[in-house]
Amino acid sequence: MAFFPDVPKIAFEGPKTKNRLAYRHYNASEIVEGKTMQDWLRFSVCYWHTFRGTGSDPFGSATLQRPWDDGSNSVENAIKRVHAAFEFIEKLGAPFYCFHDRDVAPEGATISESNKNLDAVVKALAEEQQRTGVKLLWGTANLFSNPRYMHGAATTCNADVYAFAAAQVKKAIEVTHQLGGVNYVFWGGREGYMNLYNTNMKREIDNLGRFINMAADYAKSIGFTGQFLFEPKPKEPTKHQYDFDAAACLNFLRSYGLMDKVKLNIETNHATLAGHTMMHELEYARIQGVLGSIDANTGDLMLGWDTDQFPTDIYLTSQVMLVILAQGGLQPGGTNFDAKVRRESFEPVDLFHAHIGGMDAFARGLKIAAAIRADGVLAKFVKDRYSSFDSGIGAKIEAGSVGFADLEKYILEKGEAAPNQSGRQEMLENLINDYL
Ligand code: XUL
Ligand code: CO
């Protein structure tokens, strides 16, 4: 049965095509800097927005037409949805997908029933992975929708809820492992607080540290070798999320002995909500060796919440790809479209337009970033800018061979510092425009 009967397999037709259901730039097998576009980009479709999104908002109900979905919470409906999802992913030609446990299978009245439902749907997912060759980029557990998690999961004040969350994550890691998932994600959900008057922050963060260590121990015990990823987000749903940004997550990972066990999954709209650019967050993670994967989307600078729009801005994708190329890729991570179509884009074909646009924007970003790197203009400018640290007193500072007294002696003898050179920001911004 075809769920998208009017949509053929999406092909690369080049920038001149008039066909809106074709790639203009994403050519999976094209080589850029020694690797295929597919390998650099490792695109992933997210199950929650793309197959569970309804278009409802606080002011109105569902708008999205999903003819394969009967709206029920049955396992049968969930399995039918799996078939629609894999037809979509296969036609798009994305190599990966991602899910939360509760996106793919309905929660039951007890955890045993939920696990049973999940097993039934995982069987269908495994069959579809086998049939199509689509792979699981990451799995995760939804520890925020059920009312039991109102105070958080690993940072809850209710020890039974903590145990419930542990049982849920244990199962989610097991199914991720079973499906050959190459990463497992922890996004904070409700791990944060609304008001310090009722909150023991130290206890909450310590318990979160214990939770992630237990998860890592369990994953190891069952032979799961995928990468664990933390996903920073500064606010929403709680006012203060503990995983505020890459820097806060790094502090957490270092404090709880998790640096060699967990990397980061950086999301554009989360970066901007934290008052950072995506490029800043990516570079911060990269230089510390923890850039694991990305959630590709974009926010709206006029709106202060997580709008999760599909990325179409070539400046943004070029900046993202500059950092990813500098790291030599994201593997085993990838580029997951944690993005949703607007509620006004209610037809199934809009899912194709949205993903094609995002994939083409990233493919262009990849080509633009590679061209900038090939010319070496930015790299040369930055290298020259810091050249005073390559020799003389600068080299001694970086070698750690001088202290404050030596530096004072040096500058007393010299009298004044060498003159500064221009940062040339405007010239560099103009130069980047030449590549777009
Ligand atoms: C929420 C968000 C999540 C995570 C997975 O803002 O980004 O969907 O990516 O839990
Ligand atoms: Co995300």
Image (cartoon, grey):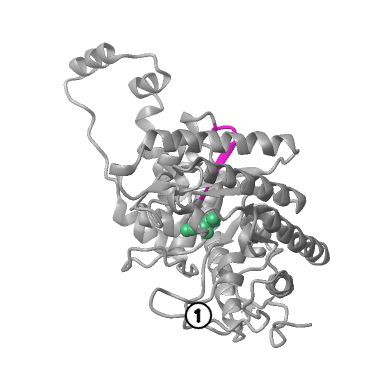
Q: Is residue 204 left or right of residue 407?
A: right
340 or 118: nearer the eye? Answer: 118
Q: In percent of the image, x 49 and y 38: which residue is there? A: 208
Q: Quadrant of the N terminus?
A: bottom right
Q: Position of residue 272 (x, y in %)?
A: 38, 57
Q: Is residue 290 above or below residue 37?
A: above
Q: Position of residue 132 (x, y in %)?
A: 79, 67
Q: Is residue 284 above or below residue 75?
A: above
Secondary-structure class at tag 1: loop
Q: In percent of the image, x 76 and y 83: which residue is there? A: 2
Q: Is residue 350 above or below residue 435?
A: below
Q: Position of residue 83 (x, y in %)?
A: 74, 73
Q: Is residue 56 left or right of residue 355?
A: left
Q: How many C-alpha atoms fall within 10 Å of the one at disc 1: few (<14), some, or many (≥20)?
A: few
Q: Is residue 171 magenta?
A: no
**What's drawn in magenta, residue-wise?**
258-265
Judging by the rendered image, the residue that carries numbered circle 1 is: 62
Q: Looking at numbered disc 1 in the image, what kind of residue is underneath it?
A: Ala
Q: In percent of the image, x 54 and y 50: which residue is there? A: 324
Q: In percent of the image, x 51 and y 43: which residue is there? A: 154
